[in-house]
Amino acid sequence: MSEIFIQLLNDIRQCTLCQEFLPLGINPVLQISPTAKIIIAGQAPGIKVHQSGVPFDDKSGERLRQWLDIDKATFYDKNIFAILPMAFCYPGKGKSGDLPPRSECAEKWRVRLLQQLPDIELIITIGTYAQNWHLPDKKEKTLTETVKNWQYFYNETTPTIIPIPHPSPRNNIWLKKNTWFEQDVVPTLQAHVHKIINK
């Protein structure tokens, strides 16, 4: 690892940028290595992940690993997966679920982190906030429309980007209404992930 990468990671671990807005305090949660091949671009840690310090250590993570068709050991191999939420600290509780990720985090750190990942072949954008950032000129008006248009992003972006909904249990109703996602998108996602892993 380069000195630049190590220093950047240390700076993130010690970041206090959003401290006054975080009800449970600072605890940046991410997974990264300069050799990672796939980015999982999520939203922000939930309360369970804040407590454990392990990304996607919750029901959302269980479903996400099912969608990717991989086990925990593979998922937590930082040489394969960089897990980079749009904000690294738990933002707190809102009226309906967690608050949005703090925008200051991505503004300060995201570009610099991505510059340290030269081998990325696939970016999985989870939810609206990640899609707004990674697909600013190409996304549709709603998350549903963006995910429905996944083939366009799949074929037209480098590295390849696949937009998906959040795997949270809160999205069970969405998944029941949009059965095409698990029928059409998930098999392609799984195949692409396995292709990268098995190189």
Image (spheres, rainbow, N blue to C red):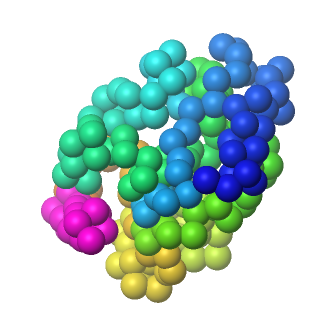
The quarter holding residue 111 reads bottom right
Q: Give the answer, above or below, for where 56 lies relative to 111.
A: above
Q: Position of 151 compared to 190: left or right?
A: right
Residues in magenta, as a range:
182-199
> Which residue is located at x 40 percent, y 84 percent?
155
Q: Position of residue 44 (x, y in %)?
A: 57, 37
> Which residue is located at x 49 percent, y 60 percent?
35
Q: Give the answer, above or below, for where 49 lies relative to 128.
A: above
The quarter holding residue 173 reads top left
> Which residue is located at x 28 percent, y 46 percent?
74
Depth order, front residue of 98/187: 187
Q: Position of 42 compared to 187: left or right?
A: right
Q: Position of residue 181 (x, y in %)?
A: 25, 60
Q: Position of residue 174 (x, y in %)?
A: 32, 47
User: Does residue 177 appear in the picture of this structure?
Assistant: no
User: Does residue 93 appear in the picture of this structure?
Assistant: yes
> Which residue is located at x 37 percent, y 41 percent?
76
Q: Give the answer, above or below, for where 170 lies relative to 120.
A: above
Q: Quadrant of the C terminus?
A: bottom left
Q: Residue furthest bottom?
A: 156
Depth order, front residue of 140/159: 159
Q: Position of 159 compared to 80: left or right?
A: right
Depth order, front residue of 67/128: 67
Prevailing secondary structure of the magenta residues: helix
| Residue 185 lies in the magenta-colored region | yes
Depth order, front residue of 135/174: 135
Q: Position of residue 42 (x, y in %)?
A: 50, 47
